[in-house]
Image (cartoon, rainbow, N blue to C red):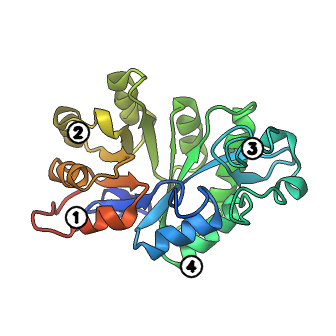
Amino acid sequence: MTASGWLAAPRPRPLVLGHRGVRGPAPENTMAAFEEAARQGADGFELDVRLCATGEVVVLHDPTLAAATGGNDPRAADSLAWDELRRVEVGAGERPPLLRDALAFARERALVVDVELKHDVPDRRALLAATARMLAAWDPAHRVFVSSFDPWLLAGFGALVPRVPRAQLVHRSRHTPLHAALALPLGARAVALERTVASPRTVRRLRAAGVVVCAWTVNAPQEARDLRAIDVGVLITDAPSVVIEALAGPGQSQST
């Protein structure tokens, strides 16, 4: 198996990844959220990255701090130096972490990390370069993959760090067949479908092409079981323990 082949390797059940760590019990995209994902038994977690003003790769979903701070701080993340951003409280005493700290935590716990490159950034080239530089130097034994809605970011990342698997994100509001079809020309190993468009027909077509299918955000037990039954390989969820329990029953697929 190649260094990047782990994503397609057969396993007893789909990988279960916490969405932004775990949303709810802890502020999303924080070290506490990643710790909660581990506590719930997740195989890993998904997170979102963008750059701050001084060029550090930070873990934050939105362009501004408004949502993370409950409206108390509307400033744009890319307008703040890291020394200032790291002091912003985003709930329960948590601060936005750096990608390198999230990766270090995950490697310690042998957790998979899905790094989503945000496409709503002022400088995609800068985000691509900084993230690629970090992951090119990262431990090749650690199971990390990169995802994005932006095909340009995925193609650029693949050119810079070909050993790290990539997943094309697909939202129901976009042209699903087109975006899903982009995976293979981009050299992506996976397509991450919003759960509402992860139909048996779509999943079957992608699997026949050798693509790993991920689904997000899957929180209902029966939905998790249904997606497992059609050979979805990765489930991204706000409730890892609920999904893992749902998958513990009979009828688990042996190939993802």
Residue shown at the point (87%, 45%) measured from the top left: 80
Q: Amino acid at mark 4?
A: Glu
The mark lying in front, picked from 1 and 3, is 3
Tell me which label, 1 or 2, sits earlier in the chain. 2
Q: Amino acid at mark 1?
A: Leu
Q: Quadrant of the C terminus?
A: bottom left
Check disc 1 and report its element: helix, strand or loop: helix
Residue 220 position, x and y percent, is 29, 52
Q: Amino acid at mark 3?
A: Leu
Quarter-of-image position of residue 53: top right
Question: Which label belongs to residue 203?
Answer: 2
Q: Are marks 3 and 4 in contact (CB under 8 Å)?
A: no
Residue 146 position, x and y percent, is 52, 49
Q: Does residue 70 sit above or below 156 in this rendering?
A: below
Residue highlighted by disc 3: 65
Residue highlighted by disc 1: 247
Check disc 4 and report its element: helix, strand or loop: helix
Q: Amino acid at mark 2?
A: Val
Q: Residues within 10 Å of mark 4 (few under 14, many from 20)?
A: few
Tell me which label, 1 or 4, sits earlier in the chain. 4
The mark lying in front, picked from 3 and 2, is 3
Tell me which label, 1 or 3, sits earlier in the chain. 3
Q: CA distance from mark 1 to mark 3?
A: 36 Å
